[in-house]
Each structure stands twice: as structure tokens, then as C-alpha cells.
Amino acid sequence: MEPVSNVVVTVSNTDLVEFNSSVRLSCSSSGSSRSFLWLNSSSEVTASDRVQLTDGNSTLTIVSVTRYDQGPFRCHVSNPVSSVTSGPILLSIYGRISSASVTSTSTQPIEGTSFNLTCEAAGSVVNRKWKKGDSYVLPDHIKFYDNNRVLSFQPLKKTDNGEYSCEISNPVSSDTAKYIMTVIYGPENVQTAGPSEIRLNQTLTLICSAESTPAASYTWNLNGTEIRNSAVFIKVITKLSDSGQYTCEARNIITGKTSSAVHGLTVTALPDKPSSCSAGCIAGIVIACLVIL
């Protein structure tokens, strides 16, 4: 009787979809009067609704695989004089990715704070890749955690504005989820526009602006006294005392920050009007000149 040797297991498919794929494992060997036994880890594999043993038990077929069918599988071949067990065979079984999503730690991404984006999906996730626009995100003040599941901004910058996407994949499926980042910041770079000198009875228009998300609210003060709550200040100048330091204060209601700029204004009186001469007056002067000549 020839002893058992050269036990080899072949697999019909290596990348399997959970609840969808079927797989066939075939065991071959040399030797005479052989019997075949399949093991899943250390347990014997027996026939069931999903499991079929054919060709004298040398072929194992699993229908509609689940994640619990990964193995390791071994084929044990024996006869009255010898026995040999194959090496372990692991099956790659993936659940289809569905309903990928990106969630954030807060609904208000504020500049200067730590902020995380988390990429989730049902199914077997093998790879996660993050993009901003069309470019892959590179580590800088941005860190990756939990096999790229978490994208962490440490801290958040206003330049982090943009569209982020998380690409999720495994060998049998893929999906993409997106997140629009609008960083809340400011106010900063407050500026005023308007004249620095004006005459009495003219109309003064001062305009205040600042970089801020969301848009800032504005308050005008004259020499420390509040005079208007708006970005634009308009007033007819009627007094010399309207001269002074016009301060615009910008405020971001979410960040709670304020910033200001000062606009100096000098009010001058109207010049004295020149004396007027009527047509008769001018004619008299001309006649006088002629007489002298």
C-alpha cells in the first residue's frame, strides 16, 4: 500500500462577497485507499444546507459564504498506513460596502480648535483614502488615526476650507462619502474707508469691512461713545465737534472675538464768501476807467 503524500488544496475563488459568493475547495494527493476529512480550525466540517462534500469528500463546496467561513481550512488525507494534513487555507470574505458617511465632532468647525472627521461604512472596509478636492490629503497639521478612519485637524486652520471625500474600498466594492468644510474664523483685517477731512454741512459716509465667517456685526464709536450699529455710517456734518476718532468694532457672534480699526476725521468750517458785484457795478467800473483814460 502506497503511503499518502503530496497533499494539495486548490481554491476556486480567493475574493468572496458575503451572502453572495460560493467557493469550492478541492483536495488532491498521492497514495492508495485514501479517505478525506475537512477541518475548519480544529473542528470537522460536516454537510449542511450550505456545505456540500462530494467526490469522496475530496471536494468541499460552501454556498453563500459568511464571514464565519474564512477558516483556516485543512484537508486531512489518510489510509491504513499513513496520514497527511495540508497547510491552512484562509478565505478572504468581504461584505459589500453600503451607505458610506463622513461625520464630524462638531457642527461648528472653529479655527484654532481640534476637529475630527470620521469615515464610516457598513461592510468589510479594507482601504480608506482621504481627498481634499482632487488631491489626496497629506499629513501636516492633519493627522490620521485608526487605519485612516479618523482625519484629525490639530488645530483647524481657515485654509482647511473645502470639500473633503473619503474613498472606501475592498476587493469587491467601493463607495465615497463627502463633507463640505466651512471653517468659522475672525474677525480679522478690519478696515475703514471714507474721507479724513470734511466741511460743515457735507454728508459723511464711512464704511467698515472685515474678514470673518460668518459675516461680522459692526459698531461705530466716536471718541468712545457708540453712535451706530451697522457696517456703513452716514451723517450730515453740522458741528465742528463731529471731528474725532471714529472707531469701527467688528464682532463674530460664534467665535466671540472682536477686532477694531480707527478712522480719524477733521471737520472744517466753510470759507468766507467773496463780496458780489452786480452787472451795474461792473458797468460803472468800466465807465470810470474810460473817463480816466
Image: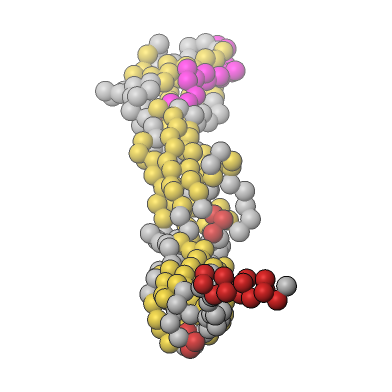
- Measuring 46% from the left and 52% from the top, which residue is drawn there? 181
Q: What segment carries the magenta color?
A: 1-16
Position of residue 291 relative to residue 170, above or below, is below
- Measuring 43% from the left and 87% from the top, which residue is drawn there? 225
Q: Nearer the viewer, residue 141 or 254?
A: 254
Rendered image coloring scheme: secondary structure
State left or right for residue 55 relative to residue 263.
left
State left or right for residue 106 relative to residue 280.
left
Total tally of numbered discs in the picture: 0
Q: Nearer the viewer, residue 280 or 266?
A: 280
Residue 43 image point, x, y percent: 40, 34
Q: Nearer the viewer, residue 15 or 39?
A: 15
Residue 141 image point, x, y percent: 61, 59
Q: Quadrant of the C terminus?
A: bottom right
Residue 70 visible (yes or no): no
Position of residue 72 relative to residue 163, above or below, is above
Query: For residue 90: magenta?
Result: no
Position of residue 201 relative to residue 47, above or below, is below
Residue 97 image point, x, y percent: 39, 35
Residue 217 visible (yes or no): yes
Query: For residue 4: magenta?
Result: yes
Q: Nearer the viewer, residue 28 or 139?
A: 139
Q: Say which quarter of the image contains residue 60.
A: top left
Residue that sits furthest to the right in the current view: 293
Position of residue 159 relative to residue 188, above or below, is above
Q: Quadrant of the N terminus?
A: top right
Residue 235 image point, x, y percent: 41, 75
- Measuring 35% from the left and 39% from the top, which residue is drawn there? 99
- Measuring 49% from the left and 38% from the top, which residue is drawn there? 167
